Image (spheres, grey):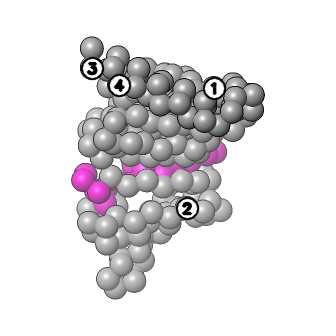
Amino acid sequence: MAVAVNPVTNKIYVANQGSSNVVVIDGTTNSTTSVAVGSNPIAVAINPVTNKIYVSNAESATVTVIDGTNNSATSVPTGNHPQGVTVNPVSNKIYVANSNSGDVTVIDGATNATATVPAGTNPYGVAVNPVTNKIYVANQFSPNVTVIDEPTIRRQSSRLEQRRQKSRSTPSRIRSMSLIRQQQRHRDQRRL
């Protein structure tokens, strides 16, 4: 079960895993409407700019796109067993973590066209920073977070396990200085 709110329209969207639907609640009147979606809806994300709602359907290998103006629904194919879904409202791109296929489906919100980006083992959760255009994918069975650079859809895996091992053997003051130097080098490289 998942829930998301569109603050612009004051509508609440609740995914019901067992009944393959999304209940739409009017935040003013508390009246409800049901919208049919794929099998086992597990996550919901909203683009408040376009008034589109994205529901990942784990058993259908789809995302249902609901038009918030009239509750019409369209199905978009994804990888196997889609889990987390997030929206970048600035670029109108939607990111879906596909746990069984080890990738992320990128949906163009204007056309519903898709692209696929590799991720780690069993990608599950996904979040976006619309300011930096970076997408972060938590991989359940690999010791890393996949970082996707949206403008180029470039994958960069950050090896958390390697960092943990390094941090165990490095005193905290040296570790923090090293991190500061790395951040400065990264900023200098971006300026070039």
Tag 4 residue? 187
Q: Is residue 118 magenta?
A: no
Residue 115 coordinates in the image, percent (x, y): 42, 25
- Spatial distance from mark 1 to mark 4, Cα to Cα? 20 Å
Instruction: Give whichever of 19, 113 is nearer the camera.
Output: 113
**What span is in magenta?**
48-68
**Local crowd size for mark 4, using a 10 Å CA cut-off: few (<14), some (14–19), many (≥20):** few
Q: Amino acid at mark 4?
A: Arg
- Which numbered dot is residue 191? 3
Asked if residue 59 lies in the magenta stretch, the reply is yes
Asked if residue 148 lies left or right of residue 28, the reply is right
C-alpha span from label 2 to label 1: 29 Å
Query: Which mark identifies residue 159?
Result: 1
> Which label sits on residue 142?
none
Residue under label 2, please give it.
2
Amino acid identity at mark 2 = Ala
Q: Mark 3 and mark 1 in contact? Answer it, CB < 8 Å.
A: no
Secondary structure category for the residue under label 2: strand
Name the residue located 34 percent from the left edge and 85 percent from the top edge: 29
Q: CA distance from mark 2 to mark 3?
A: 41 Å
* Circle 3/circle 4 CB separation < 8 Å: yes
Gap in Å between the C-alphas at discs 3 and 1? 25 Å
- Residue lying furthest top: 192
Identify the residue at horizontal 47%, vertical 44% (top origin): 127
SS type, badge 1? strand
Mark nearer the N terminus (2 vs 1): 2
Q: Tag 3: Cα neighbours inside 10 Å, few (<14), some, or many (≥20)?
A: few
Q: Residues within 10 Å of mark 1 (few under 14, many from 20)?
A: few
N-term-proximal mark, 2 vs 3? 2
Task: Of the two numbered discs 4 and 2 on the same chain, state the one appearing first in sequence.
Answer: 2
Q: Position of residue 37 (x, y in %)?
A: 50, 54
